[in-house]
Structure formats: C-alpha cells, structure tokens
Image (spheres, rainbow, N blue to C red):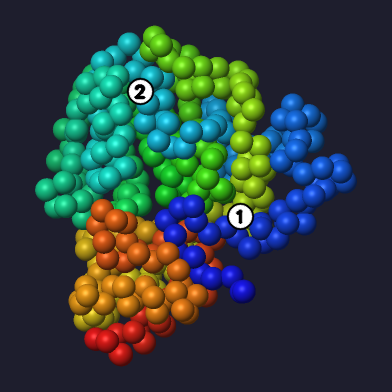
C-alpha cells in the first residue's frame, strides 16, 4: 500500500526521507553492528548522536549559549508541573493565559504548586481568538508568564509576542516549534512534546535559560529538576534514545531544506491554500478569528454536519486520513505540520472542492 497523507494532530507525519534513513540504519547504524535502539546511552556511538542532535537544534533555532537544551521524557504534560517546580523560585504566583484545552490543563496542574492568575482568557469567545494584549492583567510579582502559542485542538495561534518585561515568558510550543524562526532570547523556557514537528512520541525538548535553573521547590522529583537533568546532560536515567536519534534526523532534514525561514515559507503557503479553499466556499467555514488562525492545525466545519462521517470516509478512500476534529469540538481538523508535503494539502483542497460539488 502506498503512503497516505496523514493529517493527524499527533503522533503526526514524519518526513519520508527521515523514515527511509532510519530504515537503512535500523539493523546496523553506520557500521556499529547494532541498531540505535540497542546502544548504550553512555556509549560513544549514542553520545555522538546526542551531541550532533543538540548541535543541529541549536544551529537551526539559533539558541543562545546561555540556554540549556534538555531531551527528556514525560511529554509536554510533564512540564505543566515541571515549570512551576523550577521557576517559582520563592514566589507564590504565576500568570497564565487561557486560550484553550492545553492552556487549561497547564493551569490546572500549576494550581497544585502556586496561586495562578489567569491574566487573559478567550473562553468567552469559545477559544476562537487570542486575547488582545491591551486586556492582559499581568501580576507585578509573578514568577513567570505562561502561554500556549498554538492550541492544537482549537487551531488558535499567537503570531506575535507580549512584552512581559523582566518576568520570564514560558511557552508550551509543542505544535509550533520548528515551524518558523523564533527569537529564543525572548523566552525563559520553551518546552515541546516531540510528536508533532520533532519526531516520535516519547521525547520532550526543554530549552531553558541558565539563570532560571537551580532553585526548585521542595519535593521536586529529580526527573523534573532542570539542574539535575542539565548536569547529567539529559541522561540522569536512560533517555528515549531512539526518539532522540530520530529527532536528530529531523533536524538534519530541516537543515537540508535550508533552515527555518524556508520551512516558514512552505508552511505559510500550505496553510494559505487550505484557508483559501475554506474562505472561498459556502460549504466550509473556519471558527477561528482570521488574525489568530494557526499555520499548523486548521479546524473547519461543514455546512451540513450530517455529512461529517461521509466526508471522512470518502477522504480516507482518497488516502486523506485523520481529518476528524478532536472529540471535544467535532467537525474537521487538518494538521499540516512541517512533514506534511505540499502535495498533501493540494490533494485535500481538490477533494474538498469535489465533495462540495457533489454534496453542497
């Protein structure tokens, strides 16, 4: 069977070149006589893989020298607790922006460790936009400000950054990391689950400014302590070695494309095609405010919801899979991460046009 166009929100499509490279090296990595999955994480072969992956990520993201890069386990959700444990540093309040399902989960977890000030929320608009910065109510004594640049479920995205002054800005960047260039120096902490733009599920990347490391709250588990993990080069215990290796291959693939500026241009073009198909139709609509539409996750609604199942079934027959919206919101959602080829978006747009002609 030929490969489908997989629009899953995560675990998501991986670059075919990366999968082919991994297949070639599956049994024997570069003459070592073993698979990466079999290597000791302390051995020279894997240590070279890990070092190269970090170097490549630092290069493509232009990560400053005063930031540590950690390759951890537990998913981004583990960092919902890890962030307050590491960043409260004697303070008792943190600011959170609520723009959807993942923001709400981060808020709920943080409330276990500190007072949470919801400094801005788009809940009144059913999470279809980003709160205007003029309406944010930041705390003068907050330990940090946390936000979710892209809400995977709702398809709402920040396209610029707030100015939080000296208060560290923390971002759950799971759905946007590596989709465009960013200025890492504007953040205190960036964390991201790998299963969207980095690699397979099981790996979590944390990029943390060095001055924010080393003042954890009492009772912080060693696995969530940034200093412990940093001092151990992310190898306090056995790390997710194969996921780390595959992430490294993705970083090399991005470098081969020409870097994040090229990636951003491709992503804008892909999302632009899909939003144009939606906006130029009387049959499809987007619930998200135009100014806050995500490049990565595109939810849309059919004018006849009773045709949702038919749409999904016929799309799957055309090799367009995982287009159902999240169970909490319904409708459709096309996740078009870096590894979704432009041909996949073209095929989806063509199918949507044909479906509308037949059912609209």
**Image coordinates for residue 310, horizontal then vertical, percent:** 32, 78
Residue drawn at (32%, 11%) of the image: 90
Q: CA distance from mark 2 to mark 1?
A: 32 Å
Q: Is residue 193 left or right of residue 104?
A: right
Left or right: residue 231 versus residue 90 is right
Q: Identify the mark at residue 355; answer none if there is no mark.
A: none
Tell me the SS state at disc 2.
helix
- Position of the C terminus by quadrant: bottom left
Pick out the residue farthest to the left: 124
State the mark number for residue 254.
1
- The correct choice, above or below, for 317 with respect to 232 in the image is below
Of the image marks 2 and 1, the number of the one nearer the N terminus? 2
Which dot marks residue 84?
2
Please tell me whether residue 325 is drawn above or below residue 252 in the rendered image. below
Camera-nearest label, 2 or 1: 2
For image coordinates 28% across by 22% down, the residue present is 112
Residue 207 at x, y percent in the picture:
50, 33
């Amino acid at each position: 069977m030929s490969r489908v166009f997989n629009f899953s929100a995560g675990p998501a499509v991986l670059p075919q070149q990366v999968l082919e490279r991994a297949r070639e090296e599956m049994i024997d990595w570069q003459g070592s006589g073993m698979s990466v999955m079999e290597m000791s994480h302390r051995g020279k072969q894997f240590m070279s893989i890990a070092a190269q992956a970090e170097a490549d990520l630092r290069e493509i993201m232009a990560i400053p020298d005063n930031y540590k890069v950690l390759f951890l386990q537990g998913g981004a959700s583990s960092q919902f607790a890890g962030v307050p444990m590491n960043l409260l540093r004697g303070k008792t309040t943190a600011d959170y922006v609520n723009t959807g399902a993942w923001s709400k989960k981060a808020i709920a977890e943080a409330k276990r460790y500190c007072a949470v000030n919801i400094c801005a929320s788009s809940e009144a608009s059913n999470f279809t936009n980003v709160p205007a910065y003029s309406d944010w109510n930041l705390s003068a004594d907050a330990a940090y400000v946390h936000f979710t640049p892209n809400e995977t479920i709702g398809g709402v995205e920040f396209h610029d950054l707030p100015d939080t002054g000296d208060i560290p800005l923390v971002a759950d960047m799971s759905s946007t990391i590596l989709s465009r260039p960013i200025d890492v120096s504007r953040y205190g902490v960036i964390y991201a689950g790998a299963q969207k733009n980095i690699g397979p599920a099981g790996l979590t990347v944390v990029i943390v400014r060095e001055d924010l490391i080393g003042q954890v709250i009492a009772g912080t588990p060693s696995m969530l302590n940034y200093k412990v993990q940093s001092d151990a080069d992310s190898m306090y215990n056995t790390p997710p070695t194969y996921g780390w290796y595959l992430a490294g291959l993705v970083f090399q693939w991005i470098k081969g494309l020409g870097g994040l500026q090229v990636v951003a241009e491709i992503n804008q073009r892909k999302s632009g095609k899909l939003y144009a198909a939606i906006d130029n139709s009387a049959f499809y609509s987007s619930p998200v405010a135009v100014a806050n539409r995500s490049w990565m996750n595109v939810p849309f609604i059919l004018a006849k919801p009773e045709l949702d199942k038919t749409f999904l079934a016929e799309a799957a027959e055309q090799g367009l899979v995982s287009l159902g919206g999240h169970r909490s919101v319904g409708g459709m959602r096309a996740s078009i991460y870096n590894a979704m080829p432009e041909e996949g978006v073209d095929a989806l747009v063509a199918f949507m046009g044909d479906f509308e002609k037949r059912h609209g």
